[in-house]
Image (cartoon, helix red, strand yellow):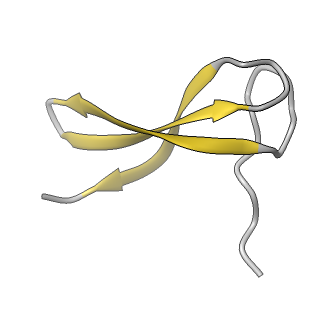
């Protein structure tokens, strides 16, 4: 079973996927915590 993404601010595991952020290395996934409503970036990078 996959581990859920944990919010670095609140520590909650309930989050939804909100899109991508473009960096010079490529795209990274943006997630939003359902508990504290803050966005954070996961470490998984999307290769183009």
Which residue sits at x=85%, y=26%?
35
Residue 20, image x, y percentages: 33, 38
Which residue sits at x=70%, y=50%?
5
- Residue 24 appears left or right of 1: left
Residue in front for this viewpoint, 15 or 9: 15
Residue 48, image x, y percentages: 12, 58
Which residue sits at x=83%, y=45%?
13
Quarter residue 27 falls in: top left
Quarter residue 3 falls in: bottom right
Total number of numbered discs in the rendering:
0
- Residue 8 appears left or right of 13: left
Residue in front for this viewpoint, 14 or 28: 14
Q: Is residue 33 above or below residue 3?
A: above
Which residue sits at x=35%, y=41%?
28
Q: Is residue 46 above or below residue 17?
A: below
Residue 10, image x, y percentages: 85, 23
- Residue 20 appears left or right of 43: left
| The N terminus sits in image quarter | bottom right
Q: Is residue 9 above or below residue 27?
A: above
Residue 4, image x, y percentages: 75, 58
Residue in front for this viewpoint, 14 or 26: 14
């Amino acid at each position: 079973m996959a581990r859920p993404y944990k919010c670095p601010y609140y520590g909650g595991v309930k989050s939804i996927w909100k899109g991508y952020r473009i960096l010079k290395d490529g795209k990274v996934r943006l997630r939003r915590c359902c508990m504290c409503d803050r966005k954070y970036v996961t470490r998984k990078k999307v290769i183009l």
